């Protein structure tokens, strides 16, 4: 089962600069564990305490997984996962 994972610039140090990598898993949790086997350190930047980190947004085929099943969201062959750091800020 091949799943494309798009990596934001800030996490590309873990993927040797790759913008996208392939992974496997039937859930996001399994996918992130699979990525960790080849890209040491990336999982802890995405997951904390068995949940997605607060300031990391993950999209499955353009749908925010927080509105699906979070880290337990089911995956299938050919899915696209996008990891994006949350953006905040502005003027006072």
Image (tube, rainbow, N blue to C red):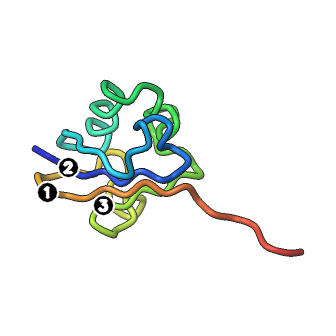
Q: 66 or 17, which lies in front?
A: 17
SS at circle 1: loop
Quarter of the picture containing the C terminus is bottom right
Name the residue at the bottom extreme. Answer: 91
| Circle 3 SS class | strand
Residue 60 is tagged as: 3
Left or right, 85 with reference to 78: right
- Tell me what residue is drawn at x 44 percent, y 43 percent: 17
The image quadrant where one finds the N terminus is top left
- Examine the rendered structure and indicate whether residue 32 appears above or below residue 90: above
Q: Is residue 90 above or below residue 64?
A: below
Res 23 quadrant in image: top left
Task: Name which residue lies at 14% across and 46% down.
Answer: 2
Q: Position of residue 42 (x, y in %)?
A: 45, 34
Q: CA distance from mark 1 to mark 3?
A: 11 Å
Q: Residue at x 56, y 47 (%)?
A: 10
Q: Specify whether 58 is left or right of 54.
A: left
Q: Residues within 10 Å of mark 2 (few under 14, many from 20)?
A: some
Q: Residue 29 in the image: x percent, y percent?
A: 32, 38
- Residue at 37 percent of width and 58 percent of height: 82
Q: Are marks 2 and 1 in contact (CB under 8 Å)?
A: yes
**Residue occupied by mark 2:** 3
Q: Disc 1 vs disc 3: which is toward the camera? A: 1
Query: Is 27 situated left or right of 19 in this image?
Result: left
Q: Which mark is residue 4?
A: none
**Where is 8 relative to 89, above or below?**
above
Give the spatial CA distance, label 2 vs label 1: 5 Å
- Labels 2, 3: front one: 2
Residue tagged 1? 78
């Amino acid at each position: 089962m091949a799943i494309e994972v798009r990596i934001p610039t800030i996490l590309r140090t873990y993927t040797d600069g790759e913008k996208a990598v392939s992974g496997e898993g039937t859930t996001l949790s399994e996918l992130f564990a699979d990525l960790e086997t080849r890209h040491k350190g990336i999982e802890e930047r995405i997951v904390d305490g068995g949940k997605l980190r607060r300031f990391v947004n993950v999209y499955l085929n353009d749908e925010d997984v927080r509105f699906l099943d979070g880290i337990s969201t089911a995956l299938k062959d050919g899915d696209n996962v996008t990891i994006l750091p949350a953006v905040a800020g502005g003027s006072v």
